[in-house]
Amino acid sequence: MPAQKGPSTKHLTESGTRVHIFDVARGFSVISMVLFHFCYDLRYLANLPIAWFAPPFQDIWRCSISWAFVFIAGCMFAWSRNNLKRSLRYLAVAALVFIVTTLVAVDTPINFGIIYCMGSCTLVAWLLDTMHIRPTGPAAAIVLGFSFLMLLHISKRVIGLGPLATPLPDALYATPYLSWLGFPGPGFASGDYYPLLPYLLLYLAGSAMGRYWKQTGIPQAFYDITNPFLESIGQHALPIYVLHQPVLLLLTMAIVSLT
């Protein structure tokens, strides 16, 4: 007997059913990312006086993009046909980005950046899934989200926030072999640093909600919110990420030559 559907939810039992809001949100974040990187190039590579592109606004904008990417990727884990293949594709692109940014040397090379984060988080989630260790539901998502915030500054040698902040042992950061995990070693530098911790916790929070929605039914509004343009952008997020920065660099150089 097919699962019953409530008046405001829909079960994802039909092949080919797509949750539009995920593509819309991801498409919006992709556009935001392109604009962010363009502002970065203009200010820090072209040295144009963009005074408003500075902390804390700059940090808030960056987080709004990267956190959305990671959480949405976690949500989509439950609907991916092959998460192992998905993770390996991300990691291969991350390796390519590192090689290219190292060779071109326009700015600090991207080492363990957002694409690496997506790949490593998906791989770990896939391993947990094969072992049937599956955090599911709002309660698990809240705990994982809180844990993510507590580990948010782990790369800065601190765990916790505000009065709960506690320094971590220097020994964790004395080796060059733990930068991928969230403990950058001596001399480590990256133009885009998103290690496994704390972002795995945010990814798993998204995965917990995605699995919950798939099992219990997803709000009808998630299907009704559509935007063909943003959905198209969201469905091509990875190639846009790879190609947008070279285009922005050429555009930045053209602007510099005219000023």
Image (cartoon, rainbow, N blue to C red):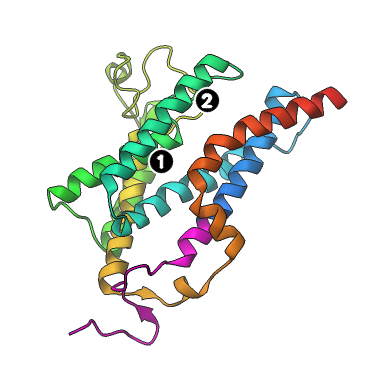
- Label 1 sits on a secondary structure element that is loop
Say whether residue 10 is magenta.
yes
Q: Quadrant of residue 226?
A: bottom right
Residue at left offset 56%, top offset 53%: 233
Q: Is residue 248 left or right of residue 185?
A: right
Q: Nearer the viewer, residue 24 or 213?
A: 24
Which region is colored magenta? 1-25
- Name the disc covering residue 161, or none: 1
- Label 2 sits on a secondary structure element that is loop
In this view, 64 is above or below 51: below
Residue at left offset 74%, top offset 24%: 46
Alpha-carbon span between mark 1 and mark 2: 24 Å
CB atoms of marks 1 and 2 within 8 Å: no
Residue at left offset 51%, top offset 47%: 237
User: What residue is disc 2 on?
Assistant: 191
For the question of whether residue 46 can be seen, the reply is: yes
The C terminus sits in image quarter:
top right
Q: Which residue is the extreme one toward the front?
A: 16
Residue 48 on image: x %, y %? 78, 27
Residue 246 on image: x %, y %? 62, 30
